[in-house]
Amino acid sequence: MNPKQIIGEKATGYIKNGMTVGLGSGSTACWAIKKIGQLVREGLIIKGVPTSKNTEKLALEEGIPLVNIAEVDRIDLTIDGADEFDPAKNVIKGGGGALLREKIVASLTDYYIIIADSSKSSEILGNYPVPVEVTPFAWEVSRRQLEKLGCKATIREENDKAFVTDNQNYILDCRFVRIEKPEQLAVEINRIPGVVENGLFLNMADMLITTDEKGEVLILE
């Protein structure tokens, strides 16, 4: 069993009957969703809130009952992946392009679990570029403003065209190298007109499930 599957399935052990569960996006979260689907088929009663269209599709294939986020006041527990994390459980997300929906779901969540294997670990965030979702209108202006913060911002592409998010926006991948003050940076990014949201998820994770150098499950609370 690969590390992503191990930690994805480990996280599902915190789900209880009757919960509303946020369903994350990405390759590690997929393993959690597949395990949740198995548990639902075995009798677990939950409602899922997907963080992307791809997650919604997988959840429906697995037979997980879904609820529209507009009908939800609180989410009991969310399981989601990360592209990078530090020892304080701050994470960078958005490699799959779902960062806006992921952050909205996270903001409603009572207990937020991040799952990421040891390859995503960093002492200081910055090895992975910070995805920033921007409006297509004047995205070049947003890029110039972002680069004034000290990064190299590149528009994400797919099939030689600008990648379009589930919300019909673009993503600028911003490479900062070392992010010494992530809280300050997140505020500065979101002040830029045209920026919808950034991929810095700070002081949000209640638990981080990862692996150590031997491949053993490691839980940070």
Image (cartoon, rainbow, N blue to C red):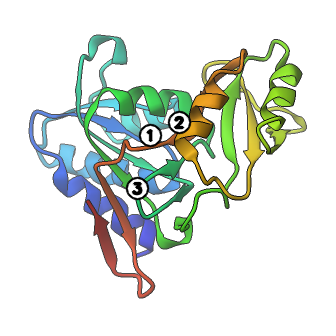
The image quarter in which residue 9 lies: bottom left
* Residue sitting at x 32%, y 73%: 218
Q: Residue 37: percent from the left, percent from the top? A: 28, 46
In the picture of the structure, the residue carrying the numbered disc 1 is 58
Left or right of 103: which side holds 195? right
Amino acid at circle 3? Lys
Viewer can see residue 158: no
Task: Pick whichever of labels 3 and 1 is earlier in the sequence.
Answer: 1
Between 10 and 142, which is closer to the camera in this rendering? 142
Image quarter in which the C terminus is found = bottom left
Q: Are the residues flagged by discs 1 and 2 in contact, CB closer than 8 Å?
A: yes
Q: Residue furthest bottom?
A: 214
Mark earlier in primary sequence (2, 3): 2
Which residue is painted at 41% across and 88% down in the image?
214
Residue 132, image quadrant: top right
Q: Amino acid at mark 1?
A: Leu
Query: Along the line of sight, which residue is nearer the eye, 183 or 197?
Result: 183
Distance CA(mark 2)–CA(mark 3): 25 Å
Residue depicted at 55% across the width and 67% down the height: 122
Residue 94 in the image: state x and y as whole percent. Answer: 59, 41
In the image, 91: left or right of 79? right
3D distance between C-alphas at marks 3 and 1:
27 Å
Figure disc tally: 3
Residue 140 is marked as: none
Q: Which residue is mark 3?
A: 89
> Residue tagged by mark 2?
54
Label 2 or label 3, whichever lies nearer to me, is 3
Q: Position of residue 56 (x, y in %)?
A: 44, 31
Please give the name of the residue rendered at 45% of the width and 61% of the height, measured from the top-left corner: 116
Give the answer, above or below, for where 85 lies relative to 62: below
Dot 1 crowding, Cα within 10 Å, few <14, some 14–19, many 20+:
some
